[in-house]
Amino acid sequence: MLITALAAAWLAQAAPAAGPIPAGPQDPPAVPLPRRALPADTKFVLHFDAQAFLRSAWWEAARSQSDVLAALDGSEELRALREQFGVDPLRDLLSITVLGGDDRGGDAAVLVRTTDVADGALATLRKLPVHSALQHRGLEVERWGPQDESETLYSASFATPNGDRVAILGRAPEHVTRVVLAADGVAPRLADSQRPAVDAEPSAGTVLYLELALPFERLLEDTPAAIAGQYAQRLTVELGERDGRAFFEARVRTKDRGDARKLADLISGARALAGNLGLIEQLPLPLQDLYDGLIAEVRDGEVRLGLALPRKDLLYLARELQGL
């Protein structure tokens, strides 16, 4: 029952794929952030949709910018993964989600979603002497590592109705089981919270999503951004591609509209100061173009910084930067 409920919660926001997972260029579609699988006290979340990223202009731009990335699909490390475990990360990794409720990251859990190829890799790894199993809060958890707890990982894994595999990883058993119990509805979960700290709802086309609801004033203390920390309550960053345009957006939620305006004025002042000091002119021309295209606005108690480029323009800028 637990596995069924967990899998159903994971897929609550997405229709199951019909038939087997396709291979090659028609890899699985974008994987939504599993909001119903997140504990209610989640305060930070990072979600990376690997397959959507590999189809996006951001991946094309990254590959044109680095010889390492350009040769990634033929690297020795990937070849070893394919040969020893039958796993190709460029094909079999679907998404990675990092979440937690501790502002220092002490209770972070990592959710890794893959194709069913992971079954063979796990079967091989479970034969190693560093693997063992234990019970925690009535759930079976796998232990990976030596007796030294500082080098040990814990995990739980399951299959979803459409054939994907999900592994939940943490540095302690409770970091794993808190996610499982929330997804099963035994413990409070984010989707049912009246006033959640984070929304955990990426917009359409997002491939990289970051959301933080942390004590920014304390975290940014004694840094150049300390003043901004007085106003910020939540930070959301999205990177992706939609309607043929690559986009980046950062949103800062403040306590009220007055604080939003103060923060926006602070950002405007910083941009003006950078211009007056000639700092922008020292940037390469492609980066100056990006800076000039950055849009800042205040909307409903949020300060938004955004940038959107047609795919061809992003690739052009990447090529220009490569030549510097």
Image (cartoon, rainbow, N blue to C red):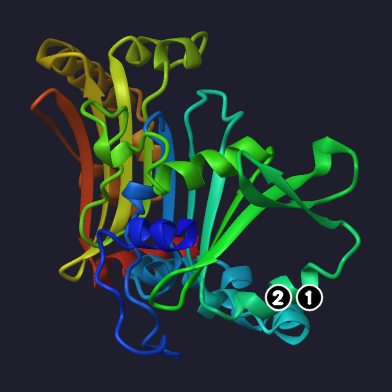
Examine the image and state in which quarter residue 241 appears.
bottom left
- Tell me which residue sits at (69%, 40%) in the image: 171
User: Mark 2 Cα within 10 Å, few/some/many (few <14, many 20+)?
Assistant: some
Q: Pointers 1 and 2 in contact (CB under 8 A)?
A: yes
- Tell me which residue sits at (22%, 19%) in the image: 254
Q: Is residue 141 left or right of residue 319?
A: right
Three-letter amino acid code of the residue under disc 1: Thr
- Counting from the top left corner in percent of width and height, residue 137 is at 61, 38
**Spatial separation of the CA atoms under disc 1 and disc 2:** 5 Å
Q: Nearer the viewer, residue 269 or 204?
A: 204
- Counting from the top left corner in percent of width and height, residue 23 is at 45, 90
Q: Is residue 21 left or right of residue 70?
A: left
- Counting from the top left corner in percent of width and height, residue 121 is at 70, 75
- The secondary element bearing badge 2 is classed as helix
Q: Is residue 181 left or right of residue 291?
A: right
Question: What is the count of numbered marks?
Answer: 2
Residue 121: numbered disc? 2
Residue 124: numbered disc? 1
Confirm whether residue 26 shows in the render.
yes
- Counting from the top left corner in percent of width and height, residue 154 is at 70, 48
Three-letter amino acid code of the residue under disc 2: Ala
- Tell me which residue sits at (44%, 61%) in the image: 321
Examine the image and state in which quarter residue 246 appears.
bottom left
- Tell me which residue sits at (23%, 37%) in the image: 305
Q: Nearer the viewer, residue 158 or 102?
A: 158
